[in-house]
Amino acid sequence: MRPDRPILLGIVGDSGTGKTTFSHGIEEVLGPERVTCICTDDYHKYNRVQRKEKKISALHPDCNYIDIMETHLHTLRRGEPILKPVYNHSTGDFDPPQYIRPGEFVIVEGLLGYYSRRLREAFDVKIYLDPQESLRVDWKIKRDTLKRGYSREQVIASLKGREEISKKFIRPQRNYADIVVSFYRPERLKDETGTRLNAEFILRPVIKHPDFSYFIDSGLVKEPCCINATLGRDAGMPVDILEITGDIPHKTVRRVMKLIWDQLPSIKMPETYIGKYQEGGETKISDPLAIAQLLTSYHLLNVKLSGR
């Protein structure tokens, strides 16, 4: 690998899975001055009016310039600039294109990032966000009503209309991820949408992960009921499964984060606290989200240090 080329992270998931929130924390860990963020959902062929006329969903690959997306990601990987399209979700139309020069790290979020082999080959680390479906629906309703001006009824109708397309084209991309992050509600908290959510991380052996079972079994983590590492299978593959509860004590979170970061030689752990998300105009913290963001940042820095 050319030592100075950008490192590319993919963050893929269905609409409303928290891709932008997830990427913001990683940007904070690595340093905003070192990171370039782009969204592949800008590569639509048609605006909102045209999609309605053609009766095609924005989630459908035929509604997106996949070939241009592929070219642009590999151009960024080489360290070269692109002129990226910009889709305006408020107007449903396109704004002028944006000149993008890649930083040390490029975070690429969107719906179709792993759709083709050539897209997948552009990434050094691939994350798929797969929250509990009822939770995703609640997140999407909140986002689209507060930030995009839709009514609750419009969002629900959109979700129903996109279900088959999502099942066919978006969710199968989960199988290509190095890490699958799934937030879900505790049994006793049926309406929880934030701070107290549990998280499950499926760690596929296509990249080398920190040994969490060692951390737990060694006694370095004092509250093992709040974090658990097991072996399992996912999509027919052997995987490590890491589970973290939303009520994990703060001191345990810091200990786990330090244990992850200690695997990186000579890089100081960031001072900033991550795991932040917005709820009703208020900034809140999710500790499982913070661990997921730090673990992802660890992998990006590990790629850079190893030169692979």
Image (spheres, rainbow, N blue to C red):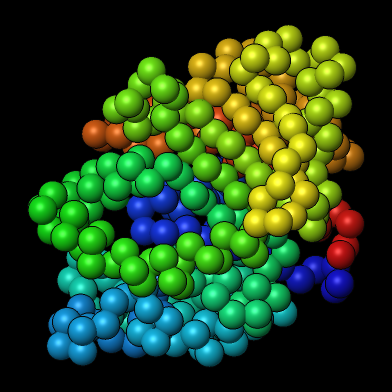
In the picture, the quarter occupied by the C terminus is bottom right
Image-based side of 61 in relation to 146, left or right: right
Residue 187 picture quarter: top left
Question: Which residue is pictured at 36% across the width and 72% down the height?
Answer: 165
Q: In the rendering, at what x and y percent does residue 74 appear? A: 66, 81
Is 251 placed above or below 195 here? above
Farthest residue, direction top: 222
Image-based side of 236 in relation to 156, left or right: right
Farthest residue, direction front: 236
Is 84 placed above or below 35 here? below
Image-based side of 207 in relation to 285, left or right: right
Q: Is residue 104 visible?
A: no
Front position in the image: 220 or 90:
220
Front position in the image: 230 or 7:
230
Question: Which residue is pictured at 50% across the width and 29% down the height?
Answer: 198
Q: In the rendering, at what x and y percent does residue 210 appear? A: 81, 38
Question: Which residue is pictured at 46% across the width and 67% down the height?
Answer: 170
Q: In the rendering, at what x and y percent does residue 68 appear? A: 51, 88
Q: Is residue 170 visible?
A: yes
Image-based side of 188 in relation to 11, left or right: left
Is 206 placed above or below 252 here? below
Residue 265 picture quarter: top right
In the picture, the quarter occupied by the N terminus is bottom right
Q: In the rendering, at what x and y percent does residue 96 appear? A: 32, 82
Q: How many marks?
A: 0
Is 38 placed above or below 60 here? above
Residue 252 picture quarter: top right
